[in-house]
Every structure is written in structure tokens, then in C-alpha cells.
Amino acid sequence: MKSVVCIVLVCSLVSMACATPGTATFYQQYTPSACYGNTPEGVMIAAASDPLWNNGAICGKMFTVKCTGATNPVPHPCYDGKEVTVKIVDHCPGCGGTLDLSKEAFAAIANPLAGVIKIEYWKEHYYVFTVENLAMSKS
């Protein structure tokens, strides 16, 4: 008897050592988006600034974002140790930050009263390995 064995391994192979510094702002109107039109993609989302946009090649990519400090007089805007993973769903042409986070994503890592924060961000890499027909059949 032949059986099919499917092994799915999902792992994140990114560390804080690969983080890129930047700034984040937030927005509140999520549709329509440049990547998905009128299809809602949830609330843990972000828009990419011009340097990241690359003609939309960044659409659907996942980034983890961590607040690292203030950019204005709001004292201590960061929620210590908090990170959020967002999906790029939109383009933010000319926006003031590297990433324009949804308000919910921003609020997960920092006080929204800050408006703009310093961040570190890194792209998440997920790998899926599938192995079929590994079962041995007895003769």
C-alpha cells in the first residue's frame, strides 16, 4: 500500500540582526488598495513608501515591525518589546514614513498620539517544504 506523506515545515529565518531602520506613520482607510483593489486584507496591513514600492513587487510581502523611539515630543511612544507583522497591501506615494501602518498595527507597537515613530523592520521569509510518497511499502 502506498501512502502519501506530506510534511509542511514553515519557519521564519529572519533575525533582528537583519533589521532595517526607518520611520512609520499610520492610516485608517484600507480599501481600495493599490495591491488588492476593494478586497479587504484584514487590519494588520501596511502601505509601502516609494523606495520600497518597486512597481508593486512588494505586494503581499510580510514584514515585522518594531518601534525603536520617538521622532517628535511625545515621550516614550513605544510599547517595550512589542512587534507586529503586517502584510503590504498598498502604496503610499510621498508619505512621510518608510511604512504607513494600519492604525491597528501602529497601536500594537506604539501610542498612536505619536503619529510618527522610529522603527526597525525586516521581511519575513516563510518556506514550505512538501515531501510526497515517502512511505515505504512492504513487499
Image (spheres, grey):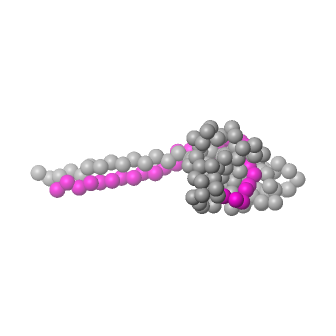
115 relative position to 103: left or right: right
Residue 15 visible in the displayed image? no
What x and y, as percent, mark residue 42?
A: 60, 61
9 relative position to 104: left or right: left
Image vertical order of residue 75 relative to residue 23, above or below: below
Image vertical order of residue 36 relative to residue 58, above or below: below
Image vertical order of residue 96 relative to residue 76, above or below: above
Tell me what residue is drawn at x 56 percent, y 44 percent. Answer: 14
Quadrant location of the N terminus in the rendered image: bottom left
Residue 3 included in the magenta stretch of the image: yes
**Camera-side residue of 100 and 16:** 100
What x and y, as percent, mark residue 4?
A: 27, 54
Tell me what residue is drawn at x 14 percent, y 53 percent. Answer: 138
What x and y, as percent, mark residue 49?
A: 70, 43
Residue 90 included in the magenta stretch of the image: no
**Camera-side residue of 79 and 23:** 23
Residue 20 visible in the displayed image? yes
Tell me what residue is drawn at x 58 percent, y 53 percent. Answer: 36
Which quarter of the picture shows residue 114? Answer: bottom right
Tell me what residue is drawn at x 66 percent, y 47 percent. Answer: 91
Looking at the rendering, the stretch of residues picked out in magenta corresponds to 1-30
What x and y, as percent, mark residue 71?
A: 82, 48
In the picture as drawn, the residue positioned furthest to the right comes out as: 73
